[in-house]
Image (cartoon, helix red, strand yellow):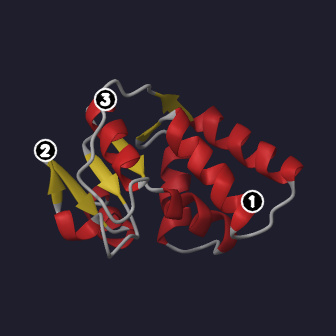
Amino acid sequence: MIIVCDTNIFISATHFPGGPPDEIIKLIREGAVELAISPEILSEIKRVLKEKFGIPKEEIKEAIKNIREIAIIVKPTRRINLIKRDPTDNRILECALKSKADYIISGDTKHLQPLKKFQGIPILSPAKFLVVVSR
């Protein structure tokens, strides 16, 4: 099973251990699910860690290295412009299409979760995904 996680999943897993995002990262590390990520999503994670959280450069490098170690890096070739209010969310959709993801996992209740599905790929909250994967 391949999943694509929104930036907020990585941020939450780092800053709020023990919650559903952290559990998803554990599943990825254990090999229970595969994570697909794109260079654009990695750049967004770097930007958010720096600008919103003021994380030092070396810690950001380490975080990105850790993500790269557990992920399949995909390079989307198709640009999507579905979400106008937050264009960076379109990068999640692009990665999901390119990787043929089974699920998109996002804590974004404004833009991504309301779509419910994108081209047949379910978009779930971290908690709902954990229910699905535990079946």
Measuring from the top left, give residue 82's x and y in whole percent.
23, 52
**Res 39 label:** none
Above-or-below relation of 19 to 31:
below
Q: Amino acid at mark 1?
A: Lys
Q: Position of residue 48 (x, y in %)?
A: 64, 60
Q: Which residue has dot 3 on it?
A: 98
The residue beneath circle 1 is: 50
- Furthest-front residue in this view: 84
Which kind of residue does numbered mark 3 sit on? Lys
Report the side of 133 relative to 57 (left or right): left
Query: What amino acid is at disc 2?
Result: Gln
Q: Is residue 65 left or right of residue 37?
A: right
- Is 19 placed left or right of 102 in the picture? right
The quadrant of the picture occupied by the C terminus is bottom left
The residue lying toward the viewer, choosing from 44 and 96, is 44
Q: CA distance from mark 1 to mark 2?
A: 32 Å
- Camera-nearest label, 1 or 2: 1
Horizontal arrangement in the rendering, residue 105 relative to residue 58 (left or right): left
Q: CA distance from mark 3 to mark 1?
A: 27 Å
Tag 3, which secondary structure? helix
Question: Which residue, given by chain and number where applicable, does mark 2 sit on?
Answer: 119
Residue 10 in view here: yes
